[in-house]
Amino acid sequence: MMELSIILITWNSDRFVKDCLDSVWRATEGMKREFILIDNNSTDTTRELLLPYINRPDVSFFPQTRNLGVAKARNIGLRQAKGRFVWLLDIDTVVNREAREAMTEYMDTHDDCGLCGCKLVNSAGQVQDSCRRYPSFRFKMYNVLSSLLKKCKGADWMKSRIERLNESQFYHRQMKLSDAFEVEYIIGACQFIRKKAIEQVGLLDEHIFYGPEDADFCLRAGILGWKVCYLPSVSFIHEYQQITSKRLFSRMSWVHMKALFYFFWKHKRI
């Protein structure tokens, strides 16, 4: 039986491809595994760099003629996946065997867990808020106000108040401990999913081009009784690229906002 299906999307990812794929190969060596690579019409040297990998017998490659976004591209992989577990990964990750083994063992010993993830850190050692409470309009406003107030002088009492409210969407206290714990959702940079859960929950929502398809899947899984769990005792590198934060009024920022408002409407999140 196929143990693990690894699904990776590339899109102008030439600076990450080799490090990511080589690390996943090492981390899953010895398993019965398959790699499903989807390229979202890269225009840099990504496809050239993929050539040594896509000719391997355990790799399926699906080149696209346009950028499908995250949900549609990952769904191509999810439809093909044969493993009893499916590992959704961002291409800007560098994984390790310890984390992969910990997630596999956790899923094997917790039948009610439909999805888990581990701690993500960047190369400078900064921990990412990769487990969170479900997105809401309220949390989005806290994020925006917190960012704006940091640039202002004075009003320290207001900054402190908004920061405390903003913190309520995260699990910072639990993340500092070593025991696994249940969360509302884990970001799609690392989602280790039980195939049985996917069969019950369904595919990613293709109305969402870029975020929050990960939260939507976890919410739907939770409704069906599947737990979503975070393992703070193991970690790997994620060079987090929040492309919507680089330019507030960029096209991708508006695409992301549109997806968020769709999510708020769909799940009545205020």
Image: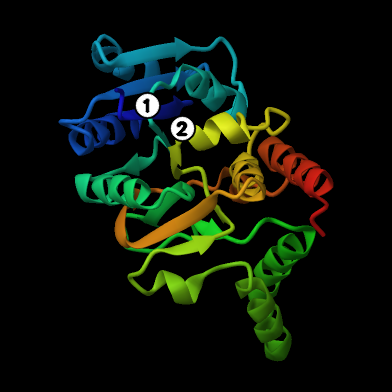
Judge from the rendering whether residue 47 lies leftward or rightward of residue 244; answer left or right: left
121 sits to left or right of 212: left
Residue at the spot of label 2: 195
Write the residue at 44% across / 50% down: 116
Q: Is residue 138 above or below residue 92?
A: below
Disc 2 marks which amino acid? Lys
Residue nearest the viewer, comparing 49 with 39: 39
Dot 1 corresponds to which residue?
Answer: 83
Based on the displayed image, in which of its 4 quarters is residue 8 positioned? top left
Q: Position of residue 235 (x, y in %)?
A: 31, 56
Secondary structure under the numbered disc 1 in the rendered image: loop
Q: Nearer the viewer, residue 205 or 143?
A: 205
Question: What residue appears at the point 37 percent right and 13 percent down from the top-left corner?
Answer: 60
Residue 44 in sight in this render? no
- Mark 2 is surrounded, within 10 Å at the Cα level, by few (under 14), some (14 to 19) or many (20 or more) other residues, namely many
The mark nearer the N terminus, 2 or 1, is: 1
Measured from the top left, where is residue 178 in percent x and y? 33, 70
Cβ atoms under marks 2 and 1 closer than 8 Å:
yes
Residue 146 point in image, percent of width and height: 67, 71
Residue 116 higher or lower than 156, as above or below: above
- The colour scheme used to paint the residues is rainbow
Furthest residue toward bottom:
157
Quadrant containing the C terminus in the rendered view: bottom right
